[in-house]
Every structure is written in C-alpha cells, then in structure tokens.
Image: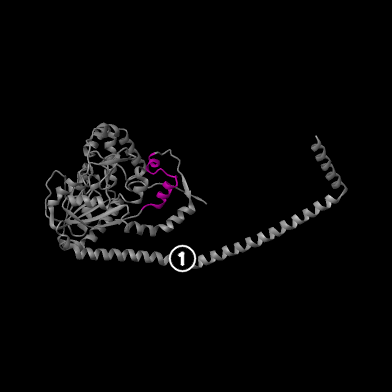
Amino acid sequence: SPLVAASQPLPFSSMSERDWRRAVQLWRAHAPALLAELPKRGCPACGADQSRWLFDSYDLHPYHECDVCGCWFVPRHVDWAVFDRLFERSPEAAAHAEQMMGYRDADSGRESDMARIGGYLDDLLPLLPVERESVAYLDAGCGVGHSLRAGLERGFRVQGVEVDVAALALVRAAGLPVVTPDQDVPGAPYHLLSFWETLEHITNPLATIQQYLPLLAEDGLVAITVPNLNALATRVLRESCPWIHGGYNTPGHVNMFHAESIGRLLDRAGLTLLDADGQFSANPLELLAVLAGASRGAFDTLDDHAPRQALPQTAADLLSALWPGAALIERVALASPILRVIACRKGQEQRFAPELSALRDRRRAEIETTANALLAEEVDYKPISEELQREINRRDDLLRTTTASMQDEINRRDSLLEQERDRYARSIDGRLRALGRKVGRLIGSRQ
C-alpha cells in the first residue's frame, strides 16, 4: 500500500512549529531548577492529598492522578511567578512569550475564537434569566478579548478579567473593558460567569471560582470549558500529548478534569453541575500513528531531526472513513477533546429544568440527525456479504475439485510405481540383487 506521513498536529493553531519548539526548549533549559523551588499542592478538584505519580510531560512537569476522584494534576504551585523568574533568567524567553501572545490576536485566530465562543453563548441564551439585550456577562480569563467581542456582537454588557500582561495590553488597546484579578470588578451582578479554557491553568481553581461567584446573580449561570481528561488522545498519548503540558511560558494545563472531577470541584464551590457536553473529536491518524509505533507524539515534534514515519495509506483511508461514527460515540460518552459544563448555585436547579430539558432534546435530535445521515450514506452490506459468500463457496468448490484431482493423480502415480517395482523384481537383475541380499543376511547370521 502507498504510505502517508504520520504527522502530528501542533497544540495550538496560533503558532508555528518552530516557535512552539523554541518556547519549550527555552523552558526546559531552566525547568528542573524552577520546579524544584515550588511548594506542593493536593488535588485541585476534590482537595485530597493522596495521589500517585503518572509521568513527566514532554515539558518536564510531573503529573499525578488523584486517588479519590481521578483528576490529573501537577502537584506543584505552578503560577505566573514561576514564569516571571524564567523571564528574569532568559530575556529571550520573555520576548518569545510576548511575540507568541500577539499571534493569538491575529485576524484568523480572532475569527475562529469568536465563532467558537459565540456558539457557546448562543447555546446558553435560552437558559439565561433575562433577554439578550439585558445580559451582563463576565469572563474570567478573557485572554486577548475574543470572548468579549463575541458578547458585544450579541448585545451583552461585557467585562473581562485577565492576568497575562501581554494579553492585557492587547485587550486595552482594543478598548475592551478588562481588569486584573487583584482589582475590583465593576458592574455586578452578572447573569453569566464564564471560564473558557481557564480553570486548567490555575493552581487553585476552587479559590478562583469562589472569588468571582459573589458577582453572579442569584439565578445566574456558570459556564466552563476545559480540556477533557477522558479524551482519547489524553488517555492514549499521555505525556506525549501536545496539550498535556504544565507550561513553557505561561501556566499550562496543570489540572486535567473529566466530568466527575469538575463536578466535585463545583460542588465544593457551592454549585450544581447542570449539564455536560463534549466538543470536537480526536485526530484518528494521530492515534493510529502512536498505537502503530510510527509516532512519539509531541516528542517527535520537539526533535526536528527525528525521522518522520509513515502509515499505510489504505489503513489511514479506512480509519478516516469510519471515524465520523466514532466521533458521535465520543460525544455521547463525554470523551471529546473539550468538555463543556453548565452550573448554577445550589438550590436554583429547578429554575433551569425546562430549559435544560429543551437543550437536551435539541442535542439528542442533532446527534440522531447526524447518525441517520451517516447511516444513509452507508453502503448496503447484504449484497456485499452475499457476493463474498458466493466467492467463498466458489473457492471451496475449486479447492475440493483440485484436491480430488490431485488425489487421483497421486493414486495413479502410486499404481505405476508399484507396477514398475513388480516388473523389476521379476527381472534377472532384480532376482540377482534379491539373492545377494539373502546370502548377505545368511553370512551375517553365521558370523
């Protein structure tokens, strides 16, 4: 079969492979010394102190698994101060981090982020306690402000919170409202509080939720997205998974949640998890490459001298053809790469019951529509199987006929050989040889 390259995707689309590799290299040069200075911490989800070491990630962060809730986490206080010390040691790392943050504000990244977060907001609108034009929206960890732009497009009153200095500069330059975590947040109460890909970066996510929860209206919603611990790539690639990283120029994914562990975290904060859903799907060729030994995941991307392996084209084509069905299973099983969660204050659950039921009905209909479309495109396997059975029967008949013919030929040759033996035995030469053998046996017995 022809071969297809077993290439690995970068962890983020807003950076080049060269920039990502250099950022990790700069961090790894100082990581052992910097990490050794950090105090220890327990499970960020349930607070337990019992955990076991799993692996060291490709950027040298140790990952543990909580013995109680199964959350994966870096058992060290990895915060912004760590990277301030990195930048003091390495001015190149500081300049590189600022440059890479700028890439996130590029037009292409802005449009895709606004479309994605806008989709989240559209899904939440029917559940919010006020009309669209009256929604007050607070995003904790707003990055370069794409979430705020998406909210403004929908008529929301928006407010952001961000800690990254480079991101803050970009948000303020765009004229968007933003404060730092140590500043007062104006405009409370808010009907929607979001943490879009934020809680995985924070060393104490419980304290962060509790910090902003008083700003939420009594009947408001909390919306969260996090990388999913139960995603196939997370479980299969582990330390070589591009998004399993503790951080190389900002705090990385030091917490990896699944639905159960984030539910425990929300419960400790005084919230009830109302709904969980999955988004996106695994890269099937990436998984196949790792399982087939043709790739080492992020370690291959880091090593620009590593030989690029290949997979059989037929295997890649077959897997790609089958994967749309697997993607549906991922979503239903909450094994998609992104986990989306909606929560409310304890005691407010019934307030959202009708809207949640309608949301789940819409999701079920969407999944069924997609599944039916896939089934409609599927070939009819019955005639294929019947044709296959006819071919098997034809080959079986041919084998039986050939076997019988071969046996007849063997019998014929055995008969001819026996006839030749009899003819030889009756010949003078044959009799003399037989007599010689008898004489030899007689002499041997007398000796």
Left or right of residue 40: residue 431 = right
The colour style of the image is one colour
Determine which quarter of the picture holds residue 341.
bottom left
The stretch of residues the image draws in magenta is 282-302
Circle 1 packing at 10 Å, graded few (<14), some (14-19), many (20+), is: few
Residue 291 appears in the figure: yes
Residue at 54% over, 65% down: 389
Instruction: Say what amino acid the circle numbered 1 marks.
Output: Val
Determine which quarter of the picture holds residue 301.
top left
Which element carries disc 1, helix, strand or loop? loop
293 within the magenta span: yes
Residue at 24% over, 61% down: 123
Left or right of residue 398: residue 47 = left
User: Who is closer to the viewer here, 111 or 285?
Assistant: 285
Magenta stretch prevailing secondary structure: helix
Q: x and y percent of residue 298 in the render?
A: 37, 43
Q: Residue furthest right?
A: 428
Q: x and y percent of residue 294 in the render?
A: 45, 45
Q: x and y percent of residue 241 in the render?
A: 35, 45
Q: Which residue is mark 1?
A: 379
Residue 196 appears in the figure: no
User: Who is closer to the viewer here, 248 or 275?
Assistant: 275
User: Who is closer to the viewer here, 50 or 167?
Assistant: 50
Residue at 43% over, 65% down: 378
Q: x and y percent of residue 333 in the render?
A: 32, 57
* Looking at the image, residue 22 lies above or below residue 373: above
Left or right of residue 391: residue 33 = left
